[in-house]
Image (spheres, rainbow, N blue to C red):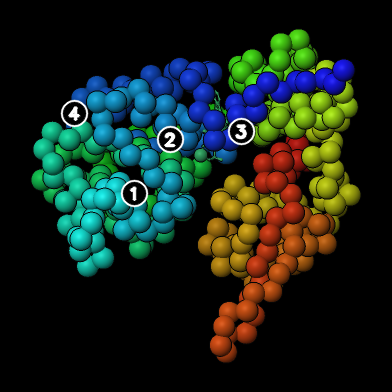
């Protein structure tokens, strides 16, 4: 008889939105108090490391407040004022309009002018916006001064607002209310894993010990996404081995994941290189990057150091280099790609630093 463990894989995927959030009651209460106890204009920043539940919380709060016209925009995908506004306004809204030639202020007015519209806007990965080129945050935080209804603005980021908002915007926002999501500890990760396992796995095919092992292995990063993916991978490995999901299987699958970047690979890296890599990965939103992205994420890095860092990452097998032609007379540019999954790499690096 073949061992079936996975009943439904969906709850183990990143797109899955659980009905129940584990262990963020205080933060949800705080955000509700800050944002939804009056009709006033307000901006709240939800800050936390990757996998601390920022996106989940924001989507959950949108659902909790159906009286608001809630719009969610990922600023990494929609990384300009116009793209953000076309997400908020909706495609149909602009049929035949003069979207490209209108000023940002006018577009905002057109979208928000409708009376008694209660607006809740979530800008996720908001650190992806280059503050100097974007007015949208400034305008949304001042909607009432433009004669528009108040906008509840939720900004989600892994960074301090000083890192991505410029001084004008920072000073125009009397005070950004900040809610920090702490990285999860093993107990919280265990609770999250338990509720996912109940949805995704057949009863009796896994035990609490296995879930606790995953929680312990994920505690270094405190990243719930990492923990859930390790659960998914372990369940698959158990099926492959035709065994129940035990802590031994978890250990084995975690080794499989972390093997390509084990100590022998990381010996190429000096301590400063590890530190830069951690900052860089925390700010990187894709698997590919160019030197421009390195410069914008780590502005102080000298040319010489950057090339040493890239060489060492290449020798350690963490990244691959590919030449991109940049067209007529442009010579070549390099594009780099990560060989290992970002969260796993980060987890290993955190462990290394402990
Ligand atoms: N408290 C929680 N209860 C249940 N599931 C959670 C909880 N926190 C996070 N998760 C799950 O963990 C995964 C990561 O959470 P989420 O995407 O919200 O993190 P994030 O802070 O937005 O990370 P990133 O900065 O990488 O975007 C998601 O699958 C989410 O559903
Ligand atoms: Mg997110």
CA–CA distance in space, label 3 to label 1: 25 Å
For residue 37, side relative to residue 207 (left or right): left
Q: Which residue is mark 2?
A: 46
Going from N to C along the chain, the mark reached first, 4 or 3, is: 3
Do callouts 4 and 2 mark residues in contact (Cβ within 8 Å)? no
Label 3 CB sits under 8 Å from any ligand 1 atom? yes
Label 1 CB sits under 8 Å from any ligand 2 atom? no
Please tell me in which quadrant of the rendered image residue 185 appears: top right
Going from N to C along the chain, the mark reached first, 3 or 1, is: 3
Please tell me in which quadrant of the rendered image residue 208 appears: top right
Q: Is residue 141 above or below residue 234?
A: below
Going from N to C along the chain, the mark reached first, 1 or 4, is: 4
The residue depicted at 44 percent of the width and 18 percent of the height is 26
Q: Is residue 22 above or below residue 295?
A: above
Can residue 189 be seen from the camera position used here?
Answer: no
Q: For residue 87, which numbered disc appears in the image?
A: 1
């Amino acid at each position: 008889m073949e061992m079936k463990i996975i009943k439904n894989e969906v709850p183990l995927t990143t797109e899955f939105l659980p009905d129940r959030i584990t262990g963020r009651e205080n933060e949800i209460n705080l955000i509700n108090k800050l944002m939804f106890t009056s009709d006033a204009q307000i901006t709240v920043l939800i800050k936390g490391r990757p996998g601390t539940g920022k996106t989940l919380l924001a989507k959950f709060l949108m659902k909790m407040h159906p009286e608001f016209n809630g719009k969610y925009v990922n600023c990494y995908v929609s990384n300009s004022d116009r793209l953000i506004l076309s997400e908020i306004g909706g495609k149909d809204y602009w049929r035949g309009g003069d979207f490209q030639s209108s000023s940002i202020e006018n577009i905002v007015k057109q979208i928000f002018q409708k009376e008694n519209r209660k607006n809740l806007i979530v800008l996720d990965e908001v650190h992806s916006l280059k503050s100097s080129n974007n007015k949208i945050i400034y305008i949304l935080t001042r909607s009432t001064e433009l004669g528009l209804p108040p906008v509840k603005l939720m900004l989600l980021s892994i960074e301090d607002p000083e890192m991505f908002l410029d001084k004008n915007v920072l000073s125009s926002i009397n005070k950004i209310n900040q809610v920090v999501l702490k990285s999860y500890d093993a107990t919280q990760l265990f609770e999250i894993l338990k509720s996912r396992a109940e949805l995704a796995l057949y009863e009796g095919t896994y035990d609490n010990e296995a879930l606790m092992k995953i929680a312990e292995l994920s505690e270094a990063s405190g990243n719930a996404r990492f923990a859930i993916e390790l659960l998914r991978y372990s369940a698959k490995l158990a099926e492959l081995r035709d065994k129940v999901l035990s802590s031994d299987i978890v250990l084995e699958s975690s080794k499989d994941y972390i093997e390509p970047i084990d100590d022998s690979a990381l010996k190429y890296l000096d301590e400063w290189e590890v530190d830069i890599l951690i900052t860089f990965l925390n700010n990187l939103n894709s698997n590919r990057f160019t030197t421009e992205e390195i410069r914008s994420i780590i502005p102080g890095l000298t040319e010489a150091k950057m090339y040493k860092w890239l060489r060492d990452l290449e020798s350690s097998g963490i990244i691959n280099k590919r030449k991109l032609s940049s067209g007529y007379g442009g010579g070549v540019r390099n594009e780099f790609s990560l060989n290992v999954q970002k969260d796993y790499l980060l987890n290993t690096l955190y462990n290394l630093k402990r």
